[in-house]
Each structure stands twice: as structure tokens, then as C-alpha cells.
């Protein structure tokens, strides 16, 4: 039986867990690919949003602890991923 992953609240806790845990004992089926923000941002896009939509985007980004621009980039990347 697979165990759920523990809640890790810091980078140090995550590093310590990965260094010592046998990940084959954990249920990783809920994991999703994540694109890291390493690529240089060389192009700028200007968009107009209705006030309510931008407020909702900013609120959701804040819930996830990220900037709303990064949240929008991740939403666009997710929309471009092939469906499995």
C-alpha cells in the first residue's frame, strides 16, 4: 500500500526527505509535470483583461504563492501540453 507524501514546509525539509526516503513507498500518481522558470524571458506580451478576470487571476496566483504573470505563463504552458 502506498503512503501519501508528507507535507514539507521548507526547502531544507524537502531536501532531507528526498535524501533519506525510499520514494517507491509513496503514491506519486497525483504528481504533475512542472516547468521551471529558467528560460530567459525575451519577449513581452501586452493583454487587456476585464477587471474581474484579472482580480481572479491575481487571487488564484496569491493562493499558490506566485506572481500573477508566472501563473498566466503556467496556465498557457498547461494549455499547450498534449493530453495523455
Image (cartoon, rainbow, N blue to C red):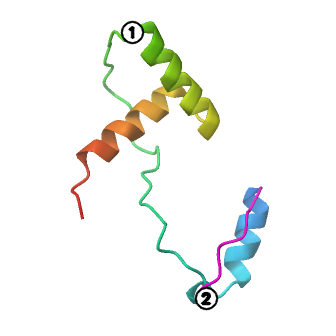
- Residue at (33, 46) in percent of width and height: 78
First in sequence: mark 2 vs mark 1: 2
Q: Residue furthest left?
A: 82
Q: Is 76 on the left-hand or right-hand side of 65? A: left
Q: Residue furthest bottom?
A: 1
Is residue 31 on the magenta stretch?
no
**SS state under label 1:** loop
Residue 12 or 31: which is nearer the viewer? 31
- Residue at (52, 75) in percent of width and height: 28
Quickly name the residue at label 2: 25
- Residue at (73, 75) in percent of width and height: 17
- What secondary structure is the magenta-colored segment mainly? loop
Query: Between tags 2 and 1, which lies in front?
Result: 1
**SS state under label 2:** helix
Is residue 7 on the magenta stretch?
yes
Q: Which residues are magenta?
A: 1-9
The reply to whether callout 2 and callout 1 are in contact (CB within 8 Å) is no
Quickly name the residue at label 1: 50
Q: Quadrant of residue 41?
A: top left
Q: Is 36 on the left-hand or right-hand side of 44? A: right
Residue 40 seen in the figure: no
Q: Position of residue 34 (x, y in %)?
A: 44, 55
**Above or below 33: residue 45:** above
Amino acid at each position: 500500500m502506498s503512503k501519501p507524501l508528507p507535507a514539507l514546509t521548507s526547502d531544507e525539509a524537502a531536501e532531507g526527505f528526498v535524501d533519506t526516503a525510499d520514494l517507491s513507498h509513496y503514491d506519486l500518481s497525483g504528481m504533475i509535470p512542472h516547468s521551471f522558470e529558467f528560460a530567459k524571458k525575451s519577449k513581452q506580451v501586452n493583454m487587456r483583461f476585464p477587471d474581474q478576470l484579472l482580480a481572479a487571476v491575481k487571487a488564484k496566483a496569491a493562493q499558490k504563492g506566485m506572481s500573477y504573470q508566472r501563473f498566466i505563463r503556467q496556465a498557457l504552458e498547461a494549455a499547450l501540453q498534449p493530453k495523455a
